[in-house]
Image: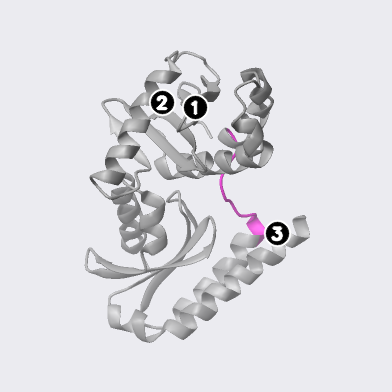
Amino acid sequence: MLLSEEVDIVKALFIFNKKSGRPFIRYLGRRGEFDIEPFLVIGFLTAIIKFSREVGKSELKIIDMEELRFVFTEKEDVVVCAVTTKLINPLDLLFKVQTIETLFLNSFNEEQLNNPRIELEFFETFLPTLEEVLYGSVRSFSEEEIKQIKVILDKFVKKHVKMHGSAIVSFTGDILVKSFGNDEQEEIVRTFFNAIFGTRVSGIEKILIELSQLSFEGYSILFQRIEEETLLVLISKSGEYLQSHEEPIQKLSYEISKLLRRKDELVL
């Protein structure tokens, strides 16, 4: 999803073998304006990954450097790195990068990836898939799904009087369905996600998955994972209330998850 006709989602994207440094893919975006030597990126990222593990004891996902942002992931010694600007939603791009990595590893086996005799043009057959993922949209709901989920959320908030609001949020920070009592509560949730997006260097996916409840701007916010790409968000003035109502919250999560699975099965 482009922010405008002037901003491409990536300046470049590289897929390479971390051990050998061999670049499988060098994609320069649809505009092709960002021509950079892949071995410079490979050397830089390899050093950063090694430093973060040995010194910081952490797994980096995003690095900001001047006007550039590096979003990358690693699996089975294959690194996928997207070079972009700070105008692009980092969680959106991180999800796309992880999806590209999974599809790439499913497209080529270990023998092919480790065979230096195979020409690099062989891997270019993956480029159409790469572009489809990069320029496709992340999780969204149909109008019917939004209506059905909103009914469920409204009913839950009305029944539990200490619950100030609830929403379904994509892990890119977009509020997909909402049931808030006022604009302030919606703004609290948006502000929280914006604060996460502003993190300069972070394993953001890990933060969201491990996060369950926190206090923010005087509210207690609880996160419940619905599916791979979406979160159930509940907001209340009482953290104790959220903790004591774990069972109905789990039932709410299950009801929405069941609805989404049923819709996806019908599509298939």
Determine the image quadrant of residue 236: bottom left
Determine the image quadrant of residue 63: top left
Quickly name the residue at label 3: 264
Are the residues tagged 1 and 2 within 8 Å (C-beta)? yes
> In the rendered structure, which segment of residues is drawn in magenta?
135-144
As drawn, the label of residue 73 is: none
Above or below, 230 relative to 34: below
Quickly name the residue at label 2: 42
Other-residue count near label 2 (Cα within 10 Å), few / some / many at <14 / 14–19 / ≥20: many
Q: How far apart are marks 2 and 3 (CA)?
A: 38 Å
In the image, 57 versus 127, the foreground residue is 57
Q: In which quarter of the image is the N terminus?
A: top right
Q: Which residue is drawn at 47% across and 79% down?
A: 249
Q: Of callouts 1 and 2, which one flags the residue occurring earlier in the amino acid sequence?
A: 1
In the image, 22 versus 81, the foreground residue is 22
Other-residue count near label 3 (Cα within 10 Å), few / some / many at <14 / 14–19 / ≥20: few
Above or below, 226 relative to 79: below
Q: Residue at x 45, y 77 (%)?
A: 157
Residue 145 among those drawn in magenta: no
Q: Of callouts 2 and 3, which one flags the residue occurring earlier in the amino acid sequence?
A: 2
Q: Distance between the residues labelled 1 and 3?
A: 32 Å
Secondary structure under tag 3 reads: helix
Q: Amino acid under label 1?
A: Phe
Q: Amino acid under label 3?
A: Asp
Q: What is the chief secondary structure element of the magenta stretch?
A: loop
